[in-house]
Image (tube, rainbow, N blue to C red):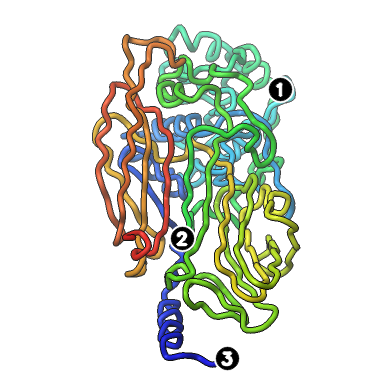
Amino acid sequence: MRCTIGACIWLTLIVSAGLLSAEVRGFKVTTDKTIDASSLESIVAQVIERSGAKTNDEKAIALFNWLHQTIFHAANPTEPRPQTVGPLKIIHAYGWGLCGSQHTVLKALYETAGWKCRYVGWSDPPHTTIEVFYDGRWHYFDVFLKCYFWSKDKTYIVSQEEIAADPSLVFDAVKEGRAAPQHLCCGDTEQAVVSGCRSRQVVGDVKGWGSCTWRDQNYSPFLSLPSGASLRLDWRGEPDAFAWKAIVHTCGIKDFVRDPVLGSLAEHYGPRGYSSGTFTYAPNFAEPADLADITFTNAVARDGQLIAQTDKASAIFKVSLPYPYVRGEVHVVHEPGPAHLFVSNDAGKTWKPVIGSDITAAIRQRYDVWLKVEFAGMLRSFRMHALVQHNRYALPYLLPGKNIVEVSLADGQLRPDQVLVVTYAYQEAFATQPRQRFDGKGVTYGPVKTVTRVIESVPSSFVIEVGGNTPPKMLFLERSVRAKASLAR
């Protein structure tokens, strides 16, 4: 193909810009009031630091409280092979699990804190629990039933063996002030706890339980976005927008209605369940930053479009996320020849053709998605719009007062022709009277407030001042990557 001087200069700019990847990796937004849940290590370190915990009992309780706030009990999530579900995936993508899965996550946190753990199974009633070893003894924490028990002298958290030998450790815990603040808040009974401890069998330190692996395999909660993409995570769930099955906590709001740990953070949203997000990717073929992570073969970029050099050119778009896709569609504008769409879930090793624009069947409950468009003639535009599922309780929410928001990238690199855009939307909340129940009653909301910041270098921080006398109703957090020139237009 003959190259004009202008076209050659343009292609040279593309090649040069391509030396610095346009995809931003580990696009993280955190606040000084919430926990960075991007790793087990960051969770443990920040929970302990921000709780002010000093003793091992205090540290264990702080981690227990954080997990109770973050996930709830429901079915064990499963995924198609070779995908697996580990602790961080439960925290970020789902937000729920049965007793074995929930306690596998708690076990992972306690082990990350440096403590030895073991599974203990019950036969009456059937139940999977864990115990953690520190200060020379075993301690029983049940994040599924929401309970733990102090000793009679309130000096340490007791073990299941001690409960089996002295049931009054459980039966008298509430009246003696030795029970957890959220004590059995989903309706389980003290008798069931005693019976379970008496029927216990120590299983030991096995690596994972049921469908939950000991640690995450081939999964990272870090968000990477190509230039021209945005991800908006809502605090609400779209109807029928679930990746696996429709999950709503069957206990309704029992787990927070009287719970001082979770209550006011959760009451705005109703019973706990999945939350939705919107992913949009529409690269501008006239922007070098947007072109940098598109792999095109037998084609060149010119005048804001991809020009086929043969009758079978292709462009590959990588749209991998840490949240499972629910449904999606792709729209391309091309002429004059045909265009064909393919999807790969194994990094381009195999490709499946897609007829039409709906790609839901090919991407549902998948994370690592590549899309390929084969075309002749000109590819004028590409746009993907998809829904994802996530756990709102793992997001960096806002609280009344001053919130310092930190924005960072894993590799600390941002191209000079790119910007990051971060947007929070929320409503300030006002409790009109002292409350004994966190059920949304007696709460009024202000107008929707939207705060947007354009970030040109990382790390970066900004402040959001939130009014109200109770945690605000969070609406969404959106992260985008834009070519600087396109944002200016």
Residue with the mark numbered 3: 1
Query: Badges 1 and 2: C-beta atoms under 8 Å apart?
Result: no
Q: Residue at x 48, y 20 (%)?
A: 256
Q: Nearer the viewer, mark 1 or mark 2?
A: 2
Q: Is residue 385 above or below residue 171?
A: below
Question: SS class of the residue under badge 3?
Answer: loop
Q: What residue type is labelled 1?
A: Ser
The answer to whether any part of residue 62 appears in the image is yes
The earlier-in-sequence mark between 1 and 3 is 3
Task: Find the distance from the CA under tag 1 to the CA under tag 2.
Answer: 57 Å
Q: Position of residue 350 (x, y in %)?
A: 73, 67
> What count of labels does the image hold?
3
Q: In which quarter of the image is residue 450?
A: top left
Image quarter in which the N terminus is found: bottom right
Pick the residue in front: 476 or 411.
Answer: 476
Residue with the mark numbered 1: 199
Is 429 on the left or on the right of 394, as rendered? left
Is 379 on the left or on the right of 397, as rendered? right
Q: In which quarter of the image is residue 135?
A: top left
Q: Which of marks 1 and 3 is in front?
A: 3
Classify 10 Å Cα crowding around label 1: few (below 14), some (14-19), many (20 and above).
Answer: some
Residue with the mark numbered 2: 228
Question: SS class of the residue under badge 2?
Answer: loop
